[in-house]
Image: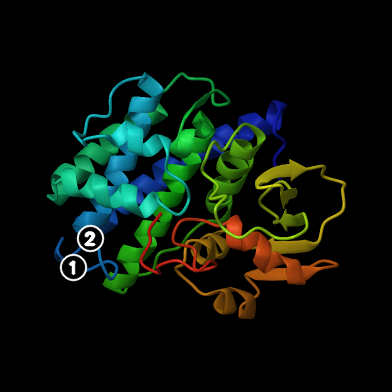
């Protein structure tokens, strides 16, 4: 399913964002509610309850952003911390928030999650309007929906894996992370979210991202910034991907080798060897594509 960024295509994306967020929330709620113990480890560092608390903290933050209100979780210095966060310090924010947001009762957490999602889904805000996000990036309302959906899907995958349960991730829902969140943010501003202290490639590197579920988009990295290049312009590497598995790879849940061997990700183009230099800088929190601690979370 391909989407335009204006007109009927934009309306379709917004409807799908509603559907995806509601479905992911309902499935995540059922999963957490039926876990045998909230103290079961979902990852090496977080329990099921910790994981749910993390997702709740994001949901209530997004409601506060839409309502232009204070975040209803008392976390000292949160706004100042959010303003200077980059992709490699997101884990520090998560640790800081969870240290102060101490609620771990699954029933309370799930009630707060569903109340927050109900509030988001009831918004009358223009889906193309923007709010402040991490690192002073600007994210559309639709992008908030897409990002929260991805959080529910990826962290749901963590919990389901610990419970040895199946966790299907619809590709058309996972794809919203790219079309509504990442690419739309790059069309506006990503603030200080990109870690420009990392080693940069010596030459500009352009990477085309293709999927049956997203608009084909080329990103260019150079001069310590990244931007969306013309759709018909040249590129160095092409990444053809299945969104659900690509997201798991980019957030460090599966390895690059797994994704490539299963052909969930196919790498091509005239100069594919330039892709690692691009991904060293343009990566996701917890993506094991750059030299940083493997326990970082998004």
For the question of whether residue 15 can be seen, the reply is yes
Q: Quadrant of the C terminus?
A: bottom left
Residue sitting at 66 percent across and 51 percent down? Answer: 213
Residue sitting at 40 percent across and 67 percent down? Answer: 293
Q: Measure the alpha-carbon separation of dots 2 and 1.
A: 6 Å
Q: Is residue 291 left or right of residue 155?
A: right
Q: Quadrant of residue 114?
A: top left
Relative vertical location of residue 147 with respect to residue 289 in this rendering, above or below: above
Q: Is residue 135 left or right of residue 296?
A: right
Secondary structure found at label 1: loop
The image shows residue 55 at horizontal and vertical percentages of 31, 47
Relative vertical location of residue 268 with respect to residue 51 in this rendering, above or below: below
The image shows residue 119 at horizontal and vertical percentages of 34, 27
Neighbour tally class for label 2: few under 14, some 14-19, many 20 plus, Cα within 10 Å: many
Residue sitting at 74 percent across and 60 percent down? Answer: 202
Q: Quadrant of residue 198?
A: bottom right
Secondary structure found at label 2: helix
Q: Nearer the viewer, residue 241 or 100?
A: 100
Q: Are marks 2 and 1 in contact (CB under 8 Å)?
A: yes
Q: Is residue 128 left or right of residue 122?
A: right
The image shows residue 68 at horizontal and vertical percentages of 37, 19
Relative vertical location of residue 174 with respect to residue 180 in this rendering, above or below: below
Relative vertical location of residue 276 with respect to residue 149 in this rendering, above or below: below
For the question of whether residue 18 can be seen, the reply is no
The image shows residue 152 at horizontal and vertical percentages of 38, 51
Q: Nearer the viewer, residue 237 or 119?
A: 237
Question: Circle 2 is placed at which residue position?
Answer: 48
- Which disc number belongs to residue 215? none
Q: Is residue 181 left or right of residue 110?
A: right
Question: Circle 1 is placed at which residue position?
Answer: 40
- Of mark 2 and mark 1, the one earlier in the sequence is 1
């Amino acid at each position: 399913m391909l989407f335009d960024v204006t007109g009927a295509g934009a309306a379709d994306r917004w409807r799908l964002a509603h559907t995806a967020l509601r479905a992911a929330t309902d499935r995540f709620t059922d999963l957490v509610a039926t876990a045998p113990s909230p103290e079961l480890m979902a990852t090496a560092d977080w329990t099921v309850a910790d994981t749910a608390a993390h997702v709740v903290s994001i949901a209530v933050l997004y409601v506060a952003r839409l309502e232009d209100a204070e975040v209803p979780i008392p976390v000292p210095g949160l706004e100042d911390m959010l303003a200077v966060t980059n992709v490699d310090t997101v884990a520090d924010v998560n640790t800081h928030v969870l240290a102060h947001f101490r609620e771990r009762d699954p029933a309370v957490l799930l009630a707060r999650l569903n109340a927050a999602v109900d509030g988001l889904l009831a918004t009358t805000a223009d889906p193309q309007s923007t709010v402040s996000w991490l690192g002073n990036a600007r994210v559309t309302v639709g992008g908030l929906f897409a990002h929260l959906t991805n959080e529910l899907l990826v962290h749901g995958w963590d919990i389901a894996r610990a419970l040895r349960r199946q966790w299907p991730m619809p590709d058309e829902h996972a794809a919203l992370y790219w079309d509504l969140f990442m690419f739309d943010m790059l069309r506006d501003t990503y603030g200080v979210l990109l870690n420009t202290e990392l080693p940069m490639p010596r030459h500009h590197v352009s990477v085309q991202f293709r999927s049956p579920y997203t608009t084909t988009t080329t990103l260019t990295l150079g001069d310590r910034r990244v931007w969306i290049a013309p759709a018909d312009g040249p590129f160095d590497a092409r990444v053809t991907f299945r969104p659900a598995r690509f997201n798991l790879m980019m957030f460090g849940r599966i390895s690059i080798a797994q994704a490539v061997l299963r052909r969930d990700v196919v790498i091509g183009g005239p100069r594919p060897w330039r892709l690692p230099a691009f991904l060293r800088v343009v990566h996701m929190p917890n993506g094991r594509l750059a030299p940083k601690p493997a326990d970082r979370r998004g």
